[in-house]
Amino acid sequence: MNFARTAIVVLTLLLAACSGNEGTPPPPSAPLGPGISITAPTTFTETCNDVTLAGFAGVVGRLRLPANSVEESTNVNVTWRNDANGQSGEAVQNLLCGPLVGCSHTWQTLVSMVVGDNPITVMATDLTTGATSTDTITINKPFMTYTISGTFLSHLGIPPGRTSSTFITKDGSGVSETAGVQSDGSYRFACVPDGIYTLTPSSTINYTFSPTGLTMSVAGADITGQHFVAHAFPISGRVTWASSGSPATGVAVRLSGSGSIATASTSENGDYSLLVPNGTYSLTLIDNFSGLSIPSTPPSRNVTVNNVDVTDQHFTR
């Protein structure tokens, strides 16, 4: 009887309390500021005149999954500001949730730098309450860097195509670096500080380069127009599947002979092209992984280049 009487009293008090505060919302809970974390030097990576910052952000309130964005899911917006140059922006946020480990909320952003100290502030904002949490890091940029770029083309302006056979080496400021010439003939060196540099071309194909080298001074600006030329002509053809006649994409065509060796990869249309000086060459199809010859029709082709393009060197496999 005493237990029943006590239960009735408690229930009566609760009903009275609710009716006495009808229409009054409960007091707001203390807002939780979203936490972010930056710890130098492991959370940033310098790339030329920029720095990539990354860290963590607290998940505020309930996750609203699925949602159209991480901001909608977490109710958090992460922004940054570099007081050295006045630039600011939003960070990219990522959310990874697992059934046992909960959710990991990270952010990443690219920040432009200036010479000297760069005080960078990162702020996470609760989009519902407006509560914020900030952290700062100061990164010193001792000097700016620049680019050196140019091309390698034939004497008729033809690029080397889809082959990794030609390289440009940059020497200077105690550093040697090599860049590959791209399929369109372009090459580029990034993150180059002021100094005197020499560029030297080389290739597994027996080109005669003109010039044989270039020297330039980088002084507060990018250097462009560092071009190399070789007297050369393209050997070209197409590789198709024997069963269907459709293009064979990504097939390796090996060239050898006249002091040269190179491999070209077929395009999405099955086409290939190799830029070579005058000479006699052999062409075969090879396996991309083992480097061994693979069956084709014909098994190989012998080609002589004499101041003219050589076309229609086709294979089926």
Image (cartoon, rainbow, N blue to C red):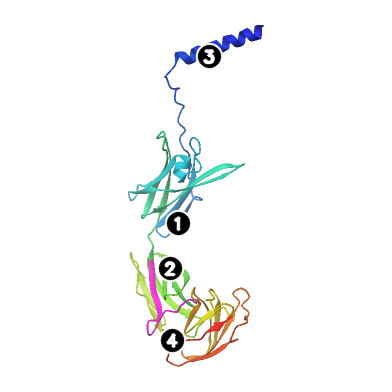
**Secondary structure beneath disc 2?**
loop
Distance between the alpha carbons at the discs numbered 4 and 1? 41 Å
Bounds of the magenta span? 147-164
Say whether marks 4 and 1 touch (CB < 8 Å).
Answer: no
Closer to the observer: label 3 or label 1? 3
Q: Residue 179: x and y, percent? A: 46, 71
Q: Give x and y (percent) for residue 81.
A: 37, 46
The crowd level at tag 3 (other Cα within 10 Å; few <14, some 14-19, many 20+) is: few
Q: Which of 91 and 208 is in front in this view?
A: 91
If you read the primary sequence from the N terminus, does the residue marked by circle 4 or circle 2 appear first? 2
Quick one: SS at disc 3?
Answer: helix
- Residue 86 in the figure: left or right of residue 108: left
Residue 11 versus residue 112 in the image, above or below? above
Within 10 Å of the Cα at label 4, are there few (<14), some (14-19), or many (20+) other Cα atoms?
Answer: many
The image shows residue 111 at horizontal and vertical percentages of: 40, 52
Whole-angstrom CA distance, mark 3 to mark 1, is: 62 Å
Helix, strand or loop at label 4? It is strand
Q: How crowded is mark 1: few (under 14 residues within 10 Å), some or many (20 or more)?
A: some
Task: In this rendered view, identify the residue nearer to me: 241 or 176.
Answer: 241
The numbered mark at residue 173 is: 2
- Say which residue label 4 marks: 233
Q: Where is residue 180 in the image (x, y as percent from the top left)?
A: 47, 73
Provide the residue designation for mark 3: 14
Amino acid, disc 3: Leu
The dot on residue 46 is: 1
Evaluate if marks 3 and 4 touch, with contact meaning CB atoms under 8 Å apart.
no
Amino acid at circle 2: Ser
Q: Which part of the image, by quadrant, shows the C terminus?
A: bottom right
The circle on residue 221 is: none
